[in-house]
Image (cartoon, helix red, strand yellow):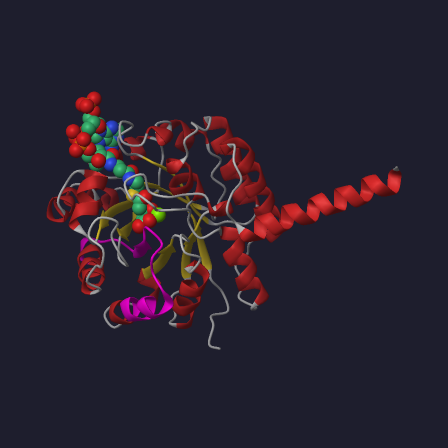
Amino acid sequence: MKLPAHATIYEVGPRDGLQNEARQVPTVDKLRFIEALVGAGIRDIEITSFVSPKWIPQLADASEVARGVNRPAGVRMSALVPNRRGLDTALAAGMKEIAVFLSASETHNKKNVNKTIADTLKAFDEVIPVARAANVSVRAYVSTVYGCPYEGDVDPERAVELTGQLRDMGVYQVSLGDTIGVANPRQVEDVLGRVLAKHPAEAVAMHFHDTQGTALANCLVGLQMGVTTIDAAAGGLGGCPYAPGASGNLATEDVVAMLHSMGVQTGIDLDKLTEASRTAATFVGHELPSKYLKAHLGKQARARRQAERSTS
Ligand code: HMG
Ligand code: MG
């Protein structure tokens, strides 16, 4: 099997994960979560969103998070920005990287940012050049690449066209999103094959939600095709509030465990990462879907029971 020696995990739990939680997570818990993830060796992390608090109240404390977070050297921290207002707030809060976002399907785009795709690209004209002039790196997401909750099938050529337009505008990487978790490995091979025929692999990232349990299989296809940046959320937190049925992201510990066991390095300490997810489960107040985390918690509980039995 042809695999890269190293893969980059782009952690989106504090943003894609927490944007979808019913409970308002206190800023201090968000900061601890980010710190724990960085402590586990995560080097690329999306910490929040500078979007309208009317649309995503869960991340209304974006400035507090961005100002409060420790920024060790070598760690890239990013945040979603939908418009010039979001960019100005992000810059004032010290962000050095941002991500713009749009969808491959009109209806999801409209539900998510209240604009057509064409108008969203126009709004990026007010964001990307200003960010680049301020020495801020810009990443981009294309959502609903593999299927739309409103329109169903999406033409795979949309991903190719939008990747081209976004790269022409100055983004360094385009993350292709399976927003509702419907992609299958064959479809991933088709979409990535088309995109990679026109764009270098380092300009492309994979972003899978794990609704149907296909995210790891999808990642494996992308890795074999040379795409080495994988978006994931600790514990499998996540979902998009404007994509009904979208469940959690691919869990970071699930993909890291698979990569390490195949000899693909990530620089991440799996035990520390799993502890970060365990902590996140306590502050969101419910179990998280990660399989590796569940197995880890089961092992811990068995060890505790054994220790209690041997002392009683
Ligand atoms: P709008 O209502 O059309 O625009 O929202 P507006 O300009 O009328 O703004 C509405 C209100 O928000 C106004 O306040 C603005 O001032 C304010 P009011 O005057 O009524 O008091 N506002 C802002 N406040 C703070 N920061 C800002 C900002 N902009 C406006 N930046 C808008 C348009 C784009 C703002 C809105 O639709 C929005 O914020 N959408 C964000 C939706 C979102 O974050 N979705 C989830 C992220 S995407 C995702 O999860 C997918 C991804 O993970 C990849 C994948 O899985 O595929 C990335
Ligand atoms: Mg997402």
Q: Can residue 98 be seen in the rendering of this structure? A: no
> Which residue occupies 42% across, 72% down?
224
Q: Name which quarter of the figure residue 312 lies in.
A: top right
145 or 69: nearer the eye? Answer: 145
> Which residue occupies 81% across, 42% down?
307
The image shows residue 247 at horizontal and vertical percentages of 39, 46
User: Which corner quadrant of the figure contains ligand 1?
Assistant: top left
Instruction: Tally the numbered discs.
Output: 0
> Which residue occupies 36% across, 31% down?
59
174 or 285: nearer the eye? Answer: 285
Residue range (magenta):
168-192
Q: Name which quarter of the figure residue 278 lies in.
A: top right
Query: Vertical placement of 257 versus 137: above or below?
Result: below
166 or 234: nearer the eye? Answer: 234
Q: Can residue 56 be seen in the rendering of this structure? A: yes
Left or right: residue 107 versus residue 277 is left
Find the residue positioned furthest to the bottom.
1
Does 38 lie within the magenta span? no
59 or 308: nearer the eye? Answer: 308
The image shows residue 270 at horizontal and vertical percentages of 59, 52
Does 175 lie within the magenta span? yes
Left or right: residue 33 versus residue 21 is right
Query: Vertical placement of 22 versus 218: above or below?
Result: above
Left or right: residue 16 versus residue 303 is left
The image shows residue 161 at horizontal and vertical percentages of 17, 61
